[in-house]
Image: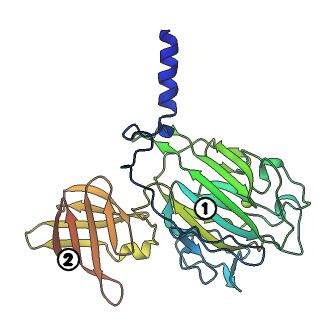
Amino acid sequence: MKSTLVFVLSAAAAFAQSQPDPNFKIHDWSRPRPPVVDPGTPGTLDQPGRPPSDATVLFDGKDLAAWCSLDGSAPKWIVKQGVMECVKGSGYLRTLQNFGDCQLHLEWAAPTPPQGESQGRGNSGVFLMGLYEVQVLDCFENQTYADGQAGAVYAQYPPLVNAARPPGQWQTYDIIFTRPRFEAGGKLLSPARATVLHNGVLVQNNVTLTGPTGWMSRDAYSPHAEKLPLSLQDHGNPVRYRNIWVRELTDAAQKEFTYPAAVLDRCVGDYQFEDGLKIGVSRTNAHLLMTIGVPRGHQHLLFAESPVKFFARDVDAHLIFQTNAHGVSGGVTFWIAGESRKGKKLLPPAR
Ligand code: MG
């Protein structure tokens, strides 16, 4: 009896996330209704559909404004006739915005006439969080290893079926991704999971990723941020993409971006407020770092909500920088614990 109870309790704990909310009765009329979303329209082979109204559109055929190269420089893929195309040797693209748990829709087409064999034919890839690849490959009458086919979680899970269309035809991916969770100390709490539909056909059914994907490797997880940019692979083939949109599934209210260092560096400096408080803003890799009370105050990592608006996760604080015509910051508004202050940038000491 006791062991049965333990089993039931541990099973309940394991599935705690999918239990009905105990705060509401069955058919509780007072329970808040879900937000209303215009679902958009489905696409056809000729014409992309319209995204849901709450989606973040990453590419709508016009430009690469939502993208950059991995090093933060301008993207080098080309946009023509409403589609974006990988340019051999130009490098991966990544989004400026960061994403964690998400629903991702994209459409891609392999080059026609097809060139190359196996992994050399129409190869690209969708890297969730820049680390976890759902393979893009021309798999129409093209033999390759199963865990490298289109729709594979690369080097981990072959697709359940090969639902490929011929090269040149538009194909869809709909991906539901759950990011891995890490404890504060970095220990893995729960691995990443992925569900993938290829041309509407289920090819990955909530599979559990073993870690980042890679050629000839199954690396273990390394702790990383809750949100990271999504990237598209340059594997040397002119694969085309259109109609890319994403819906954040958690933390959707707090948008977060990874901007090039040059954008962040505009905000770097010391700022002084009327009450005498000084804060320092420096940069560490892809983040700004705020020191409240320079030179020896507490440091807080800042996350970008826009090129001029940043927030901390560990304290309730955010900053909005005022930039001049050259985009260089001259002042800042600083909110912390419900109070706001306006500050001026201090000129660096003369040498
Ligand atoms: Mg690939």
Q: Quadrant of residue 184?
A: top left
Secondary structure state at the residue bearing disc 2: loop
| Residue at (58% x, 58% y) in the render | 103
Inspect this view and state whether residue 236 appears: no
Quadrant assignment for ligand 1? bottom right
Residue 260 image point, x, y percent: 47, 72
Inspect this view and state whether residue 64 appears: yes
- Looking at the picture, the colour scheme in use is rainbow
Residue 324 image point, x, y percent: 30, 87
Q: Is residue 125 left or right of residue 253?
A: right
Asked if disc 2 and disc 1 are in contact, CB closer than 8 Å, the reply is no
Q: Is residue 263 above or below residue 37?
A: below
> Residue 349 shows which numbered tag?
2
What amino acid is at disc 2? Pro
Q: Residue beneath label 1, please?
A: 104
| Residue at (51% x, 66% y) in the render | 37
Whole-angstrom CA distance, mark 2 to mark 1, is 48 Å
